[in-house]
Image: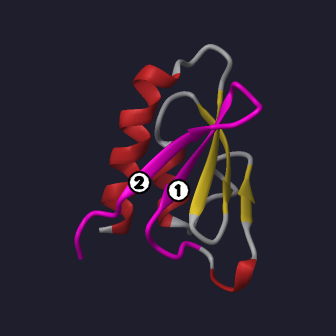
Amino acid sequence: MPHPSITVQGTPNPHAAKFTVDRTLVEGGSSKSYFDSAAAAGDGLATALFEIDGVVSLLIAEDFITVTKAESADWESLVPQIENAIKEALS
């Protein structure tokens, strides 16, 4: 399966960003929230994202992921890592 197309948008929260993908991530219009890696166990995408230093929580919905980062982390280094993790997990 080819890599997904990903669009990144800021949110009103400077510590959160929205990563929209061209795939269905959660069926039925529901969502999944994770606040630590232990809660994400069993979800390959969420586990891969929590392996990135600085990721502190995730909201995974139908076709997007909202990633919240630690205050000390910077988006410039996080965005490429997050995009790569999404591509690897969904390919």
Residue 6 marker: 2
Residue located 70% across and 86% down the image: 28
The image quadrant that residue 33 belongs to is bottom right
Which mark sits nearer the N-terminus, 2 or 1? 2
In this rendering, position of residue 28 left or right of residue 17: right
Residue located 24% across and 76% down the image: 1
The image quadrant that residue 10 belongs to is top right
How far across and down, in percent of the image, does residue 21 sit? Answer: 47, 61
Magenta-colored span: 1-25
Amino acid tagged 2: Ile
Amino acid tagged 1: Thr
Residue located 74% across and 47% down the image: 35
50 versus 64 height, above or below: above
Q: Secondary structure at mark 1?
A: strand
Residue 20 marker: 1
Q: Secondary structure at mark 2?
A: strand
Q: Is residue 15 magenta?
A: yes
How far across and down, in percent of the image, does residue 26 sit? Answer: 62, 76
29 versus 59 height, above or below: below
How far across and down, in percent of the image, does residue 15 sit? Answer: 68, 27
